[in-house]
Amino acid sequence: MLPEKFIIVSAVIEEPNPSKGVDGAIYLWISPLDTQRPGSVPRGYKLPYLKDNHSEISESQRRSRQGIRQVAVIEGGGGGSGGSWLKMNTEKKVKLKISDAPAARMPKK
């Protein structure tokens, strides 16, 4: 299952191309934030292509290249299934909301 909140490590966007029979997909490499250990082991997920997600992820990749960590939240609930290392989310289309991660706070001395 795709976690409700996660850090985007990397993404690849495959745009739909009906003339070649390509439905399109969004491949995400993420670290879940639903555990007590932030930045836990990254996992790969495949989402159905959505134009809105394409725009959000493209902008997040631009911000990431500037050194700004990006956090995504699933709008309207998550989902996904699959038994392999690449988790498939084919049951429903997932809308992502991506924003800058909060700045890390230094521990008190």
Image (cartoon, rainbow, N blue to C red):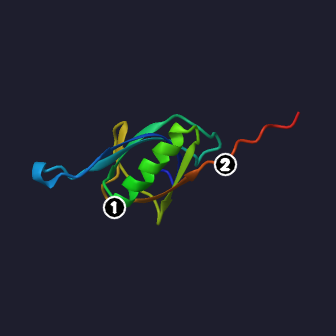
Question: Which label is found at residue 92?
Answer: 1
Q: Residue at x 48, y 63 (%)?
A: 75
Location of the C terminus by quadrant is top right
Measured in 3D between alpha carbons, the distance from the residue under mark 2 to the one under mark 1, in whole angstroms, is: 29 Å
**53 horizontally vs 40: left or right:** left
Q: Residue at x 55, y 46 (%)?
A: 70
At label 1, counting other C-alpha atoms closer than 10 Å, the crowd grade (few under 14, some 14-19, many 20 or more) is few
Q: Nearer the viewer, mark 2 or mark 1?
A: 2
Q: Residue at x 12, y 48 (%)?
A: 20
> Which of these two is toward me, 88 or 30?
30
> Most extreme residue toward the bottom, as rendered?
76
Of the numbered discs 2 and 1, the one sitting upstream in the chain is 1
Does residue 103 show up? yes
In the image, residue 28 above or below residue 19: above
**31 horizontally vs 17: left or right:** right
Q: Are marks 2 and 1 in contact (CB under 8 Å)?
A: no
Which amino acid type is marked by label 2? Answer: Pro
Judged from the image, the secondary structure of the residue bearing numbered disc 2 is loop
Q: Residue at x 34, y 52 (%)?
A: 89
At label 2, counting other C-alpha atoms closer than 10 Å, the crowd grade (few under 14, some 14-19, many 20 or more) is few
Query: Where residue 81 sits in the image (x, y, percent)?
Result: 36, 50
Query: Where residue 1 sits in the image (x, y, percent)?
Result: 43, 50
> Most extreme residue toward the right, as rendered?
109
Which amino acid type is marked by label 1? Answer: Lys
Task: Identify the residue under disc 2.
Answer: 102
Query: Where residue 56 sits in the image (x, y, percent)?
Result: 44, 54
> Which of these two is toward me, 83 or 94?
94
